[in-house]
Amino acid sequence: MNRKVAIIGAGPSGITALKNLLDKGIEAVAFDRNSDVGGNWIYSESESHSSVFETTHIISSKTLSQYEDFTFDEFDPETSDYPSHDELRRYFQAYAKKFDLYPFIRFETMVKSCKWIDDQTWEITIEKDGIEEKEIFTDLAVCNGHHWKPRYPDYPGEFTGEFIHSHHFKKAAPFKDKKVLVIGGGNSACDVAVETSRVSKKTAISWRRGYRIVPKFFFGKPSDKVAERTKWLPVEVRMWLNQILLKIMIGDNEAYGLRPVTEPFGATHPTINDELLHKIRHGKVKPRMDIERFDGKKVIFEDGKEEDYDAIVACTGYWLSHPFFDPEFIDYSKGPVPLYLKMFHEKYPNLFFIGMFQPLGCIWPGAELQSKIMARNLSGEWKRPENIQELCEKEVKNPHFKQVNTPRHTITVDYHLFIKALKKQLPKEYVSKSKRKSKLVSS
Ligand SMILES: Cc1cc2nc3c(=O)[nH]c(=O)nc-3n(C[C@H](O)[C@H](O)[C@H](O)COP(=O)(O)OP(=O)(O)OC[C@H]3O[C@@H](n4cnc5c(N)ncnc54)[C@H](O)[C@@H]3O)c2cc1C
Ligand SMILES: NC(=O)c1ccc[n+]([C@@H]2O[C@H](COP(=O)([O-])OP(=O)(O)OC[C@H]3O[C@@H](n4cnc5c(N)ncnc54)[C@H](OP(=O)(O)O)[C@@H]3O)[C@@H](O)[C@H]2O)c1
């Protein structure tokens, strides 16, 4: 049977899904609410899908953050070690141009609902210019991203100053001369605290646990490149080595007035930041404990400290969300996420998730490999294992890391182990740098 695949999203995951399906001569259409390719990496000062801000640079370095079919050297050899959001936007758009994907993407089109009919049929409802239409596809590839729906914290009392989520933080300028409290210990929180501290009257950062802050460079090399050298070692040994290296290079959190770390490396998603510790030691960012409650503009912390703030930026993460599915059908927002290779559903062979994993590293190299497996599955060159239910359960029960049980930790993978597991499903010659040979035309 001829396949016709609907892809939700033309971000880094959606474009590689599209490219690899077209490579195999499979009919595919990507829908995106945006007006161009790039997803999260299309910076915009107004509300949009994107959660990046004016000064965002990635936290994984470029040679570990590229598609194998189109590397940064092929795009622009001058790309920085840690590309900015704009370098990435241009990279993703260049990928789409190089592989002639634009005719297969329907922009400014929202996927409103996806109804699974049977193993050969999906009914997709799309909306463009306020008009809704239904279309039938055989398969669905979900590439809608997982860092766009803010997860707000909840505290007793009421805060009467400005309260925003990091999704809405676009630049530091509006925080000039304000007293700002940033909540969280992830990459958003540390980036936002550093940025607001450049202009604010005061910036403080509240952590509910201790985190290790990993610098972007060790010995003059990107830290993920240094860590890559030990990728052949078991995860526990690698994490232990990371811990030792950090202790030698950075010291303990207590030296910075930060909460001590109580879990092993990898127990929380790593926070990679070169400037936070420097800002703390220069008095520009003040470490604070968890928040106990609000009272007007006053924040009462769990150690009894009370301080007034003008603004709070909650960098408390994102919901895993698929609003186009009936929650009775699929709802992964609270975990667990039982998908084989983080992409195959045990029950629905015509449903694929691409890029829905959280590596200790970059997402799109893994999304590219997942896309190649999906394409080979649909072209008949790769078969779903018969014991897929067992494999899904095994993945949930045996995660690469034992992590703290908080909502952001339901889809974590170790970058190197995950890439290895995906490559195992592919033939040796899986890289395809040329434009497709098939005569597919856009629909
Ligand atoms: C500040 C920040 C920094 C980050 N830094 C890194 C990093 O250093 N390295 C890394 O690997 N990851 C990073 N991430 C994670 C980020 O999610 C991924 O880099 C990447 O964007 C994932 O690509 P994606 O295509 O899966 O999702 P997205 O980039 O989110 O793209 C999803 C696309 O789907 C479209 N879409 C969604 N729903 C619909 C719908 N219903 N109908 C139509 N279109 C829809 C959106 O418009 C969007 O274009 C960062 C995230 C944030 C917020
Ligand atoms: N420069 C960059 O490349 C960059 C910048 C920003 C984000 N990112 C990426 O984007 C993704 C999202 O990152 P993120 O930092 O926005 O979110 P995140 O990784 O989910 O981190 C959320 C932080 O908020 C804490 N938190 C959650 N709920 C809380 C509550 N109720 N009270 C107090 N603290 C709470 C979490 O604590 P727990 O540890 O207890 O869960 C965690 O420290 C990640 O993949 C990240 O790497 C990258």
Image: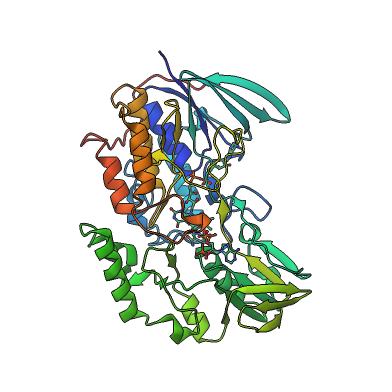
Residue at 33% over, 67% down: 223
Q: Position of residue 258 (x, y in %)?
A: 49, 80
Residue at 37% over, 33% down: 389
- The quarter of the picture where the N terminus appears is top left
Total residue callouts = 0
In the picture, measured across the screen, residue 421 lies left or right of residue 305, that is left
Residue located farthest toward the top when viewing the structure as drawn = 1
Q: Where is residue 189 in the image (x, y as percent from the top left)?
A: 55, 67
Q: Which of 90 and 180 is in front in this view?
A: 180
Residue 365 position (above or below residue 239): above
Place residue 369 in its image quadrant: top left
In the picture, measured across the screen, residue 399 lies left or right of residue 31, that is left
Residue 436 in sight: no
Residue 276 position (above or below residue 47): below
Q: Nearer the viewer, residue 149 or 71?
A: 149
Residue at 47% over, 46% down: 336
Residue 383 in sight: yes
Place residue 59 in its image quadrant: bottom left
Q: Which of 387 and 31 is in front in this view?
A: 387
Rendering colour mode:
rainbow
In the picture, measured across the screen, residue 426 lies left or right of residue 163, that is left
Place residue 124 in its image quadrant: top right
Q: Which of 287 and 57 is in front in this view?
A: 287
Q: Position of residue 248 (x, y in %)?
A: 31, 81
Residue 378 position (above or below residue 42): above
Q: Where is residue 222 in the image (x, y as percent from the top left)?
A: 33, 66
